[in-house]
Amino acid sequence: MDRLTSKNGRITAFRAGTGPDLVVLHSLLTDYAAFAHVLPELAAGRRVTLVNLPGFHGSAAVEATPAAYVGWLGEALDAFGVGGSVNLLGNGFGGTLALAFALDHPESVGRLILCDVAAGFPEAGKQAFRVMAEKVAESGMGAIADIAARRVYHDAYIAAHPAAIAERRDVLLRVDPAAFQAACKLLVGIDLLPRCAGLRVPTHVIFGELDQATPPALNRTIAERIPGATLTMLPGCGHCPPLEAPAAFLAAVAALLPAPNSG
């Protein structure tokens, strides 16, 4: 896996493989390493670019607006030579960003895979982001490790893997607090659902049955609104299938993406 940095130094990514492009955007509560166990399979016959969200691994923060984040993703695609009609996969916040980009630039997206994603949040979900932002402002990124772990994983997984909370803390401590707060602010205000009925990009929604961060109903609503969208539930899985159920995640993605040699 190679590390990439844009010429202006403001965007970083990791890349593996050769072939048709697949761009992957991670969740706000994980990082590119969430895809480490599935990368060899994803990159078999494809060029996979794992873009680091603003505030992660050297990617600079951006303004807390949908336009700024969509512009940032467009800049990232240009910076790393990803052109044409790209296959775009996003988990969590990365998926919300991927959806926003597809809505603004449908001509640039050949296929959209949304993994445990919300187009907008009910008040309870918005409050969770407000609380996390406040805790980070008061006590730093480590203060939300427990919250983050319980949003990424379901309770039974954490009980079986008690190191999960420490793992989330290690990831979060490397994140720019200002960028994290900006993303939380964006997620409180965003509402992409009214625009979904007009999207004509082939779209597939994958979600974990036990997702607590973007519950199943939010994923189903996206699939219901986007014409022709497909919906796949992963049983017994939480918010981040590449981490928690890599085999099931890979099987679902393989069924949705064009064969690697088909372009």
Image (cartoon, rainbow, N blue to C red):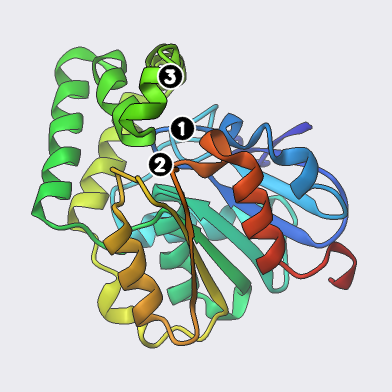
Indicate which label's residue lies in the foreground, 2 or 3: 3
Label 1, label 3: how far apart the Cα atoms are? 19 Å
Q: Residue at x 21, y 45 (%)?
A: 185
Q: Residue at x 36, y 71 (%)?
A: 222
Q: Residue under label 2, please give it.
A: 238
Where the C terminus falls, by quadrant?
bottom right
Element under disc 3: helix
Label 1, label 2: how far apart the Cα atoms are? 13 Å
Residue nearest the observer in this picture, 114 or 253: 253
Indicate the amino acid at tag 3.
Ala
- Specify few, some or many for label 3: CA neighbours under 10 Å numbering under 14, 14-19, or 20 or more: few
State if disc 3 and disc 1 touch (CB < 8 Å).
no
- Specify few, some or many for label 2: CA neighbours under 10 Å numbering under 14, 14-19, or 20 or more: many
Q: Residue under label 1, please give it.
A: 30
Element under disc 2: loop
Residue nearest the observer in this picture, 54 or 134: 134
First in sequence: mark 1 or mark 2? Answer: 1
187 up-or-down from 146: above or below: below
58 up-or-down from 46: above or below: above
Indicate the amino acid at tag 1.
Thr
Q: Quadrant of residue 133?
A: top left
Indicate the amino acid at tag 2.
Gly
Q: Is residue 78 visible?
A: no
Q: Residue under label 3, please give it.
A: 160
142 up-or-down from 88: above or below: above
Q: Position of residue 160 (x, y in %)?
A: 43, 19
